[in-house]
Image (cartoon, rainbow, N blue to C red):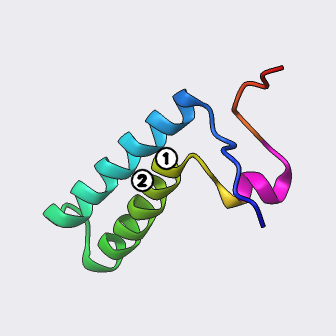
């Protein structure tokens, strides 16, 4: 399976920012312990997909926020 970038630049920035915010919330302990783990896991996923530019769910559903270049 070839991994192709399927996220646009705005989508990537929003994902990384949201992921970092969720990781900060999880590390500081703003929410209860079980939710802290969930926030941390979602934060890691968002940062990873934002940095790589590839979202497996977008690929599964055939969605792309990246502009098509000719």
What residue did someone put label 2 on? 47
Vertical position of residue 66 compared to residue 27: above or below: above
What residue did someone put label 1 on? 50
* Residue most extreme to the top: 70
* Mark 2 surroundings: few (<14), some (14-19) or many (≥20) residues within 10 A: many
Residue 8 image position (x, y, % from top left): 62, 32
Which residue is at a point 46% across and 57% down the rendered structure image? 48
Q: Is residue 65 left or right of residue 24?
A: right
Vertical position of residue 40 compared to residue 19: above or below: below
Residue 5 image position (x, y, % from top left): 66, 44
Between 4 and 24, the residue placed more toward the observer is 4
Residue 2 image position (x, y, % from top left): 75, 60
Q: CA distance from mark 2 to mark 1?
A: 5 Å
**How many labels sit on residues?**
2
Between 3 and 7, the residue placed more toward the observer is 3
Which residue is at a point 71% across and 49% down the rendered structure image? 4
Which residue is at a point 79% across and 25% down the rendered structure image? 68
User: Is 59 in the magenta?
Assistant: yes
Vertical position of residue 63 compared to residue 44: above or below: above
Task: Look at the numbered discs 2 and 1 and tell me whether their residues touch, using CB distance below 8 Å.
Answer: yes
Q: Which residues are magenta?
A: 57-63
Q: Is residue 36 left or right of residue 66?
A: left
* Mark 1 surroundings: few (<14), some (14-19) or many (≥20) residues within 10 A: many
Most common secondary structure along the magenta stretch: helix
Which residue is at a point 70% across and 57% down the rendered structure image? 3
Residue 57 image position (x, y, % from top left): 72, 58
Quarter of image, res 61 = bottom right
Vertical position of residue 9 compared to residue 7: above or below: above
Between 27 and 32, the residue placed more toward the observer is 27
User: Is 60 in the magenta?
Assistant: yes
Q: Quadrant of the C terminus?
A: top right
């Amino acid at each position: 399976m070839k991994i192709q970038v399927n996220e646009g630049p705005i989508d990537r920035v929003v994902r990384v920012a949201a992921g970092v915010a969720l990781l900060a919330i999880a590390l500081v302990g703003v929410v209860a312990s079980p939710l802290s783990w969930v926030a941390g896991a979602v934060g890691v996923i968002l940062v990873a997909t934002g940095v790589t530019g590839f979202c497996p769910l977008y690929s599964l559903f055939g969605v792309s926020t990246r502009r098509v270049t000719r």
